[in-house]
Image (cartoon, rainbow, N blue to C red):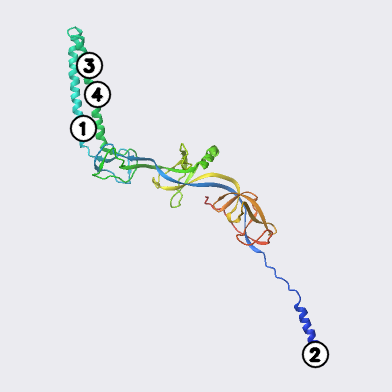
Amino acid sequence: MTLCTTRFLILSTVLFASFTSCKPKTAKTSPPVEVSVIKAQQTDVPIYQEYVGQTYGLSDVDIRARVEGWVTGVHFKEGTKVKKGTLLYTIDDIQYQTRVDQAAGNLASAKTEVARAQSQLNRVKPLADMNALSKQDLDNAVAEFNAAKARQQVTEAALQNAKIELGYAKVYAPIDGIIGISNVRVGDYVSRTSSNILSTVSQTGTVRVRFQITETEYLRFAREFKKINERMREVSLILPDNSVFNEKGHVDFANRQIDPQTGSITLEASFDNQSGLLRPGLYVKVQLLTQSFSNAIVVPQRAVTQLQNLYQVFIVDNTNTLKVKVIEPGPRVGDMWIITKGLTPGERVALIGTMALTDKSKVTPVETKWTPAAKLE
């Protein structure tokens, strides 16, 4: 092979390699991003509101001393049930027994005076009728008899009062219920003017719960009260351990006035408590059904994005393309958001989170099962 031929072959090879390297390469396209989608659902949604309340017995009766003296006996076990009329306390009654004896003696003396005056009147009246005695003597006998009867009535009242005070030396349970801790012991001195409460008896078969709502909520409830069905009058009780009390209650009444300092009004609901689980003084949450949406369209809260006052969702159409829809949201309930306008049931809503996807982006939808949360707030 000649030198010229060799040079020609080398040059041809170099030129072919150069032309080959200049051909454009085909760009690789990435597949559409996978996006979780759920279907907008239609369901009835009740709206509950929670309020902090406190429990009270059906009756909470404070036991107080009505006489003064030393406590000589405590006749109950604290924290147990007592019956109406059960003896709770005894107070030293010596001075009150003495007053009863004294009043009884005064009454006996008064009765003797009445008998003497009656006898005197019986002697004077016939003589006055025969004009053997003057009318003045008869009037004096009648007046003395009436005065003696009046003194007898006074002493009878004094004896009755002394007996009442003697009875107050024994303190009885005024109602059936559970009695609390005794604030006095044997040997303590009590009096009727003392502010100390001996103990308290509470009826707990039915428990009252008081809670407060704002004046705005009260006005809304008052206007729509006739429209509210029986279910919406029911209230649930959430205990401090977040468990739900097994009995439903009913709102019984509202206070007569709005508290001008807080702008709220007190409501009271009653709950059957035959189990005895609830005790007075317990702080609880009252869950009240305030509104109900029928056939509401709902989506997860994380499916809704907010830009200032604009709310929107991404839906996936039949071509698996994202499409922005402006919506009008209602209340948020549990993990869902009620959509009042802008969506129809069954539309596929994308849960794109923070992914950098925009309108008209192609996606690969991944159907996700979603059930609205049962626990409503």
Say if mark 1 contacts mark 2, CB within 8 Å.
no
> Within 10 angstroms of label 4, few (less than 14), some, or many (20 or more) residues?
some
Measured as percent of width and height from the top left, residue 156 is found at 24, 26
**For residue 252, side relative to residue 73 (left or right):** right
SS for tag 1?
helix
Residue kind at label 4, given as amino acid type: Gln
Q: Is label 3 or label 4 in front?
A: 3
Q: What residue type is labelled 1?
A: Arg
Q: Residue 6, which numbered label? A: 2
Task: Name the spot of residue 199 as percent of width and height, x first.
Answer: 32, 43
Task: Compare marks 1 and 2 and give the one earlier in the sequence.
Answer: 2
Label 3 neighbour load within 10 Å: few <14, some 14-19, many 20+: some
- Three-letter residue code for mark 3: Ala
Q: Which mark is residue 99?
A: 1
Question: What residue did someone put label 3 on?
Answer: 143
* Label 2 SS: helix
Give the Cα distance between marks 1 and 3. Answer: 30 Å
Q: How far is disc 1 from disc 2 in space, using C-alphas? A: 151 Å
In the picture, measured across the screen, residue 287 lies left or right of residue 313, that is left
Residue at image point 78% right, 82% down: 15
Q: Distance between the residues labelled 3 and 4?
A: 15 Å
Quarter of the picture containing the N terminus is bottom right
For marks 1 and 3 on the same chain, the one whose residue lies earlier in the sequence: 1
Helix, strand or loop at mark 3: helix
